[in-house]
Amino acid sequence: MITRMSSLFLRTLREDPADAEVPSHRYLVRAGYVRRVAPGIFSWLPLGYEVYRNVERIVRQEMNSAGFQEVHFPALLPREAYEATGRWSEYGDTLFRLQDRKNADYLLGPTHEEMFTLMVKGEYSSYKDLPVTLYQIQTKYRDEARPRAGILRGREFVMKDSYSFDIDDAGLEASYARHRQAYIDTFTRLGLEFVIVSAMSGAMGGSASEEFLAPTVVGEDSFVRCTSCDYAANVEAVVTPVTQEQDFGGLPASHVELTPNAASIDDLVALSNSVEALRRADRDWEAADTLKIVVFMVTDAEGTQKPLAIGIPGDREVDGKRLEAVLHPRDARPFEEADFAKHLALVKGYIGPGVLGSQQAAGIEFLVDPRVVEGTSWVSGANVSGSHVYDLVAGRDFSADGSIEVAEVREGDLCPECGGGLTLARGIEIGHIFQLGRKYAEAMGLKVQGETGELVTVTMGSYGIGVSRAVAAIAEQSHDDKGLIWPREVAPADVHVIATGKSDEPFDYADQLAADLEARGVRVLLDDRRGVSPGVKFNDSELIGVPTIVVVGKRLPEGFIEVKDRATGERSDIAVSDALVQISEICGK
RNA sequence: CGGGGCGUAGCGUAGUGGCUAGCGCGCCUGCUUUGGGAGCAGGAGAUCGGGAGUUCGAAUCUCCCCGCCCCGACCA
């Protein structure tokens, strides 16, 4: 079927929509691919839906060829299943809840671990049935606090979610590896540039977890990449390389010094460099020489509150996201005045290791950054207002309850694998794979009989691809200042044939060419609009972003038409006699 | 939830107390034009987010409500 622009349900916009900031959103709206109907909720118009379906088709084909089996669950689900895992309440406001006419509780599925687990439980009961991997392509609903960037982060979106079921850990690892490869194949075919980063499993529980990120400046996830090896990690999961413990023999003894009005690291460093008695012989003091103590009030799942003191080099801040990830499911907030009032051992601005740690009288848990290893020397608070301790050596003068990875990650930090430099970048999360383990199987009672007849809890993996998000991610990575540039396989057509002029000839010829191309399996978008100026058609074609553009116009009488490559802008005239063959070749048909 | 911005025709916008709410794009009719968002002429399209109030008079001022966008918090 030739798509004819004379009758296509399409209106392109000349101006950027006022509410769209990121390029993918702007162009998807301007080119008439999607329209917003509510915050984070979009409709697909014909061209957009074509692209969406192409992406979906590729995902489905790759899943099938990896041997995974497609099923389909409802989006509307009863409360009970989510009650068993506690997620009915755990999910909080993000869950769309509703009631039926009998006031029974329902939800719109935000994810389907429970349903898949129950499905397998209902059908299988023997180790001989495993392993098995099931998937679905489903609309998911999450009442996000802040949907943004068009279809990049919506409240209704389509996700491909898969779940593997294995009898043991080795099986899970194999299933995980197979899925990982299937994802590599899928994203490659979608034409996406991506990196695989190690991630925190967070709320999902389980052990290993990796994210597939499409690098772009508008991405929501920060990640690091090593410039000299292939290490890459989500910022939450970056590991600080362990520095060698140092011998502290020969280091000067610690000494308390008066440091009035130096409650901030900046003031402390400035003061230490300006007062003769405090200065270093070899160089100026730097913020990194200080040990900053940041205190949080941590609330656990039962609601119990406990202070937590974290010691990090003074030149760094605690990264909220990293803290959140490490503490999960516990929750942390910075200490407030009222908290200090209840913990008099903590002198705001002058807190030091001296009063910290579960062994001390105050009993406050004290964790330090991995950079604070035995033998390192610091300047820290003396727990008396207006005083700091110098030459405070870890392992000699103080010790912590353990270490914690929450310091902000910086460009140039060292790679934990090879010691090279790390660079920071942002990416869109297009896929996430988890070794879930037995959390859901246990909660839902998914057990099968093993070889000797005993009941064995199944171990699971969970794997997601944001299908609708992938459309936006591709648009984000593949556009220029004129519009979209689709990779051929996801493009709404292979060729955009434009007829120009006012006589019938170019239109008749274009029509015939389109029909001949279609007969060879080339998908054609035909601009057969009469009375529309060539400039409008050219601009529309660039906005729409079909990879190959064919212009039938002024040189037709001489027997030539023009072929343009949307991505490179290269154009060449080809003879009408070769047109069909050449264009088919360009399109790989 | 915190901070900032905004709500006027399908889209983009002007208009901070005074005549019939202006302009551009898009749309309709006619003529001309046809290789980079054509020209001329005519036309349709708006309860100015909603409600209440102040005023001789409100898009414009006041109060309440609703909604949207961006940043942050949040987020498998």
Image (tube, rainbow, N blue to C red):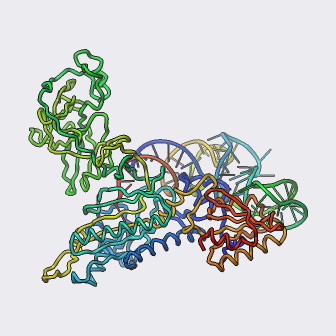
Note whether A183 is above or below A385 in the view shown.
below
**Figure quadrant of residue A184:** bottom left
Q: Residue at x 56, y 70 (%)?
A: A49
Please say whether residue A222 is visible from this viewpoint: yes
Residue A370 rendering spot, x and y as whole percentages: 23, 42
The C terminus of chain A - image quarter? bottom right
Note whether A547 is above or below A352 in the view shown.
below
On the picture, is A328 further left or further right than A20?
left
Of residues A95 and A134, which is closer to you in this image?
A134
Note whether A562 is above or below B20 in the view shown.
below
Q: Residue at x 36, y 72 (%)?
A: A162
Please say whether residue A338 is visible from this viewpoint: no
Of residues A171 and B51, which is closer to you in this image?
A171
On the picture, is A20 further left or further right than A563?
left
Figure label count: 0
Residue A5 rendering spot, x and y as whole percentages: 70, 70
Q: Residue at x 17, y 42 (%)?
A: A366
Q: Residue at x 30, y 23 (%)?
A: A284
Residue B11 rendering spot, x and y as whole percentages: 64, 57
On the picture, is A471 further left or further right than A163?
right
**Figure quadrant of residue A374:** top left
Residue A127 rendering spot, x and y as whole percentages: 21, 81
The N terminus of chain A - image quarter? bottom right
Note whether A310 is above or below A474 in the view shown.
above
**Figure quadrant of residue A479:** bottom right
